[in-house]
Image (cartoon, helix red, strand yellow):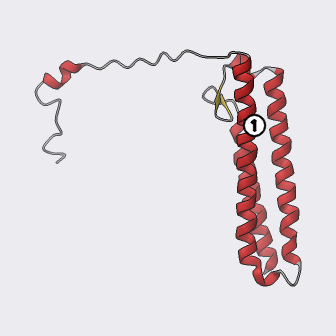
């Protein structure tokens, strides 16, 4: 029975690690939630932070897996449910701290190098649409 608990814990740890590591892919002009251009994302400093984040994620995974082997101790088995919850919360907290720490590093580098990007998202609205009959209200069929 205890091996099932350990398997579930390891599965949760692996899923959390994979989801954290997927956060470093350059998607929507962001790495770890920090907006960067493609040119700046290839900077050696940024690559170093990403490699540091990867190492820390794998370190958290290995410590969490090793810590979960405490469930094999006979006097701890009676508290396995509570300890599982505590271990999952601890792993989640450690992943959150590592993401937050590396985001701050990225933001610091971004501010030091003055990588500020313009925000030219201008939305235009046609106000004459509301004057056209039948276009500005919800249809009676929908109601």
In the displayed structure, would residue 120 be above or below residue 102? Answer: above
Tell me the quarter of the image containing the N terminus.
Answer: bottom right
Tell me where residue 107 sits by quadrant.
Answer: top right
Of 88 and 19, nearer the camera is: 88
Tell me which residue sits at (64%, 34%) in the image: 33
Residue 11 located left or right of residue 116: right
- Residue 110 locus on image (x, y percent): 70, 22
Residue 37 in the image, given as x and y percentages of width and height: 66, 19
Percent position of residue 9, x then y:
76, 66
- Residue at x 69%, y 47% (from the top left corner): 19
State the residue position of label 1: 102
The quarter of the displayed image where residue 20 is located? top right
Q: Is residue 20 above or below residue 128?
A: below
Q: Nearer the viewer, residue 58 or 96?
A: 96
- CA neighbours of label 1 inside 10 A, class few (<14), some (14 to 19), many (20+): some
Image quadrant in which you'd find residue 32: top right
Q: Find the residue positioned furthest to the left.
A: 133
């Amino acid at each position: 029975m205890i091996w099932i608990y350990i398997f579930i814990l390891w599965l949760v740890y692996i899923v959390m690690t994979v989801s954290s590591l997927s956060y470093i892919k350059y998607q929507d002009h962001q790495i770890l939630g920090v907006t960067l251009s493609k040119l700046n994302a290839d900077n050696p400093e940024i690559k170093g932070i990403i490699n540091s984040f990867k190492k820390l994620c794998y370190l958290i995974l290995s410590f969490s897996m090793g810590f979960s082997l405490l469930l094999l101790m006979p006097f701890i088995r009676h508290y396995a449910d509570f300890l599982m919850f505590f271990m999952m919360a601890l792993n989640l907290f450690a992943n959150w701290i590592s993401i937050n720490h590396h985001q701050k590093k990225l933001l610091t580098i971004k501010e030091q190098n003055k990588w500020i990007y313009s925000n030219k998202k201008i939305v235009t609205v046609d106000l004459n649409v509301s004057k056209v009959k039948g276009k500005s209200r919800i249809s009676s069929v929908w109601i």
